[in-house]
Image (cartoon, rainbow, N blue to C red):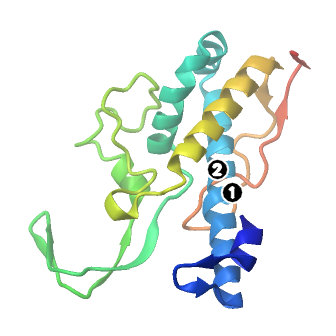
Amino acid sequence: MLSQLATGHGTDGPMTTMEAISTSVLLLIAGHETTVNLITNGMLTLLRHPEHLVRLREEPGLAVNIVEELLRYEPPVQLVPQRTCIADIEVRGVTIPKGSRIWLVLAAGNRDPERFPDADRFDPYRQDIQHLGFGSGIHSCFGAPLARLEAQIALAELARRLEGPRLVEDPPSYRRNAVLRGPRHLTVAFDGVRP
């Protein structure tokens, strides 16, 4: 992909060096960092809720529900800063005027108790999980299908292969970043690895 960015010609011609660099940085952050945090947040959550880890080992197909609930419960992207309203918007009786700069706190929306009953509880059996983990509309993440699949496979395989996994440090230290949320390291002890 990077080779195509550097040498390919799109409908508007080749990318400038700066366009190729900025697109590469975006792909690294949006396509790698977020998925790493999703998997790490997922393993941390499962180790804190071992009954779900056991169920995932027994039912690998549960990974689909687990990942969707993780995107709601502990999303890798917490907020989207510096958006601009393109029209007046009314939110709970307050008008946000056109041109206003706003921050969208997706993680707070995912924990809204008016939308999600018992919103602070991790529940992979939750029905109707329409979370904001990948944005929505024209701002929906185009890498969402790949990120979902990567997280489903990683978490199902970790559940299957690790014998007696447990957290060494809880809570772990987190990266200092308001937008992306994930531990710096997730130290896990285990008794063995299944083939």
Q: Quadrant of residue 88?
A: bottom left
- Residue displayed at 88% across by 16% down: 195
Tell me the residue that label 2 is attached to. Answer: 35
Label 2: element kind: helix
Q: Is residue 51 visible?
A: no
Q: For residue 32, which numbered disc appears in the image?
A: 1
Tag 2–tag 1 contact (CB < 8 Å): yes
Q: CA distance from mark 2 to mark 1?
A: 5 Å
Label 1: element kind: helix
Q: Residues within 10 Å of mark 1 (few under 14, many from 20)?
A: few
Q: Is residue 148 visible?
A: yes
Residue 44 in the image: state x and y as whole percent.
66, 37
Kind of residue at badge 1: His
- Residue displayed at 32% across by 26% down: 127
Residue 159, above or below 120: above
Q: Quadrant of residue 39?
A: top right
